Image (cartoon, rainbow, N blue to C red):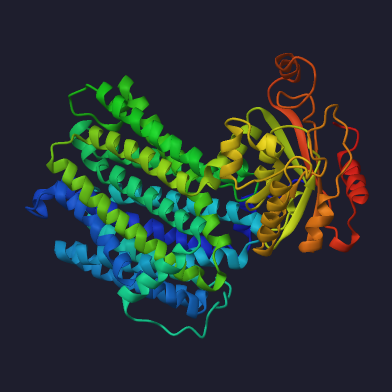
């Protein structure tokens, strides 16, 4: 049966009230912020004599300052208290902040508006840990990527609509200021009303004692998160995304006004394109990942951020129109479409980059520590965004043009991404696996949801090609330790892949008894630590597509580590380029054509006491059927 779309969650009470609460919060943030940025950019003389470029860097800095000061406390509150009640309190705080902002608007007091910016930063600081810890409490694992995608898309659509409304309302004559002041109060009230319908979300750690010292709690949060390497690197990756976005978006008002010579309509157009791109990329994650947590999309997103960031520099240089333009006039310039396309694609790949990272954090983190881990991420985000603001100001002071800032950021993204993926090769390996099964082959997983998300288990599969491990890896919810023939392990390039994936090379006793014993010790250690281990009991690739006799190594493994065994079968791979088919490899690959079909079928778990090599061979043969 076709699985329900991620959008069906919007009809369910466990998701919809929460979604609209966070949507209206993001919407209101940006109505207010963009209204302020717009009025300072296009009507500065009536508000301040300060340098507008510096103010445009200061406003994001004020917004994220509370993340540095209060994130540690907010994470503890979200773990200690029931989340629905806490959310309602936060939304009441938003109403109070918007009342302060309204006073600033109506009295032309810039300091009150800047105080409200910091207040909305506090609102977001308190809500952030609740927002991302709520989802895994109410969504199943196969809904989590889709749910995160809808939330991220909704957030950026809310940002988009808020940016459009804020930019349009504030310049509406003669009541623009009054409309912004009243509108933000009304939106805050609607957000509070939506929060009244959020279902109860029990506190994971109600006995937690609050540490009110933000410095020591921040250190403890980050220290705890750093013990789980994939989670910590996902936190850093998420923070890097906000660094990248903060630099790009901080330059946007002046890029539209001074470099492209556009009116505020051009500025709004760029906000629309970028936000729609983020939303589209976030929603694409579920489709491209096959409803599972696919961290292979993270390198894909990172590549796109650099490629289109670099192209944005060259596209900006190609824009030579020097006269002032409206939005319609800007669109009539040939070079404008390339610039808009680059901004849109940066948004799309940004969504592909960040959504899987959230899912990794939510699923691989200790549930009792999740809110505090999210709070630690928010602290890192704030630090990265502060550094981004400082870097933006420094580059402007150093004489960088705005396109040069875009180029420098894109190049820096490539360097940082390469470093992160070298530290956690799982991201890169999953990307290779994802790319392979979406280009060379069309792979279908059957009952792959049977693969355990937690705990030790042995996976047993037929051995058809040199890419068997990559196909299996692509459908696993977590890393797998593959046991493979030491000769295959040593194949150039593939050897790097297998070493990076922590594969375990094994040899027959008659060839290398020491290596065989070492392999069994490593297998036992991996299972003791709760990992998945995959073996190919045939001991070699099939030479004709049929299964070879299953060896007795599985029994030695189960003697030391009696864990569940999952039989699996690959079908449709025989005859592909990387099999031992005796025909011409290029001819058979051409005959199969691109996107050839293959399947991975997962059987039901077997108790260790019910396993023998003969039984396993029968199970795998049945799963494979007649399709080689």
Residue 112 left/right relative to 22: left
Q: Is residue 253 visible?
A: yes
Residue 129 location (% of width, % of height): 45, 67
Residue 311 location (% of width, % of height): 35, 28
Which residue is more in the foreground, 406 or 621? 621
State the count of labels. Answer: 0
Q: Which residue is drawn at 54% across and 74% down?
A: 368
Residue 524 location (% of width, % of height): 71, 59
Residue 336 left/right relative to 58: right
Q: Outermost residue, left direction?
A: 49
Task: Reply above or below: 624 against 243.
Answer: above
Residue 2 location (% of width, % of height): 75, 45
Residue 476 left/right relative to 625: left
Task: Reply above or below: 149 against 107.
Answer: above
Q: What is the quadrant of residue 577 in the picture?
A: top right
Q: Is residue 13 visible?
A: no
Q: Residue at x 90, y 60 (%)?
A: 610
Q: Residue at x 59, y 68 (%)?
A: 137
Which residue is more in the foreground, 511 or 586? 511
Q: What is the quadrant of residue 302 in the picture?
A: top left
Q: Quadrant of the C terminus?
A: top right
Task: Reply above or below: 488 against 577.
Answer: below
């Amino acid at each position: 049966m076709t699985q329900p779309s991620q959008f069906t969650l919007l009809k369910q009470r466990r998701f919809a009230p929460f979604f609209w609460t966070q949507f209206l919060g993001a919407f209101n943030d940006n109505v207010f912020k963009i209204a302020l940025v717009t009025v300072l950019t296009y009507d500065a003389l009536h508000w301040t004599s300060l340098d507008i470029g510096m103010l445009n860097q200061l406003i994001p800095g004020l917004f994220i300052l509370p993340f540095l000061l209060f994130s540690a406390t907010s994470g503890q509150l979200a773990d200690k208290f029931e989340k629905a009640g806490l959310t309602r309190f936060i939304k009441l705080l938003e109403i109070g902040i918007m009342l302060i902002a309204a006073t600033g608007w109506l009295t032309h007091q810039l300091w009150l508006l800047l105080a409200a910016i910091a207040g909305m930063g506090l609102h977001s600081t308190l809500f952030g840990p609740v927002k991302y810890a709520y989802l895994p409490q109410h969504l199943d694992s196969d809904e989590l990527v889709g749910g995160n995608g809808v939330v991220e898309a909704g957030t950026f659509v809310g940002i988009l609509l808020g940016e459009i409304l804020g930019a349009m309302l504030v310049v509406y004559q003669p009541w623009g200021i009054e409309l912004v002041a009243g509108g933000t109060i009304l939106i805050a009230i609607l957000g509070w009303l939506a929060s009244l319908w959020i279902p109860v979300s029990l506190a994971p750690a109600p006995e937690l004692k609050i540490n009110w010292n933000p410095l020591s709690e921040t250190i403890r949060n980050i220290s705890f998160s750093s013990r789980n390497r994939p989670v910590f690197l996902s936190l850093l990756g998420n923070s890097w995304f906000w660094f990248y976005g903060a630099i790009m978006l901080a330059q946007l008002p002046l890029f539209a006004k001074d470099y492209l010579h556009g009116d505020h309509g051009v500025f709004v157009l760029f906000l629309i394109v970028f936000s729609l791109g983020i939303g589209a990329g976030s929603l694409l994650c579920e489709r491209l990942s096959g409803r599972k947590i696919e961290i292979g999309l993270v390198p894909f997103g990172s590549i796109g951020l650099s490629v289109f960031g670099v192209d944005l520099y060259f596209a900006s240089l190609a824009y030579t129109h020097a006269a002032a333009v409206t939005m319609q006039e800007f669109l009539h310039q040939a070079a404008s479409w390339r610039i808009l396309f680059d901004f849109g694609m940066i948004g799309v790949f940004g969504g592909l980059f960040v959504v899987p990272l959230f899912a990794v954090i939510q699923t691989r983190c200790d549930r009792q520590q999740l809110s505090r881990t999210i709070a630690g991420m928010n602290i890192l985000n704030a630090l990265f965004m502060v550094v981004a603001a400082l870097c933006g100001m420094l580059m402007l002071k150093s004489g960088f043009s705005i396109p040069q800032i875009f180029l420098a950021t894109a190049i820096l993204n490539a360097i940082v991404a390469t470093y992160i993926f070298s530290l956690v090769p799982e991201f890169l390996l999953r990307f290779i696996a994802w790319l392979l099964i979406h280009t060379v082959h069309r792979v279908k997983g059957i009952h792959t949801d049977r693969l355990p998300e937690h705990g030790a288990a042995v996976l047993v599969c037929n051995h058809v090609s040199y890419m068997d491990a990559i196909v299996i890896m692509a459908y696993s919810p977590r890393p797998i330790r593959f046991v493979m023939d030491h000769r295959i392990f040593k194949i150039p390039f593939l050897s790097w892949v297998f070493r990076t994936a922590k594969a375990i090379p094994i040899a027959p006793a008659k060839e290398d008894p020491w290596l065989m014993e070492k392999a069994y010790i490593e297998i036992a250690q991996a299972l003791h630590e709760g990992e998945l281990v995959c073996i190919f009991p045939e001991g070699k690739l099939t030479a004709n597509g049929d299964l070879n006799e299953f060896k007795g190594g599985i029994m030695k493994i189960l003697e030391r580590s009696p864990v569940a065994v999952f039989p699996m079968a690959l079908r449709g791979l025989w005859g592909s380029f990387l099999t031992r088919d005796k025909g011409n490899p290029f001819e058979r690959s051409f005959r199969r054509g691109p996107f050839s079909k293959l399947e991975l079928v997962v059987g039901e778990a077997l108790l260790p006491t019910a396993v023998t090599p003969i039984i396993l061979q029968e199970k795998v043969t049945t799963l494979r059927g007649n399709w080689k």
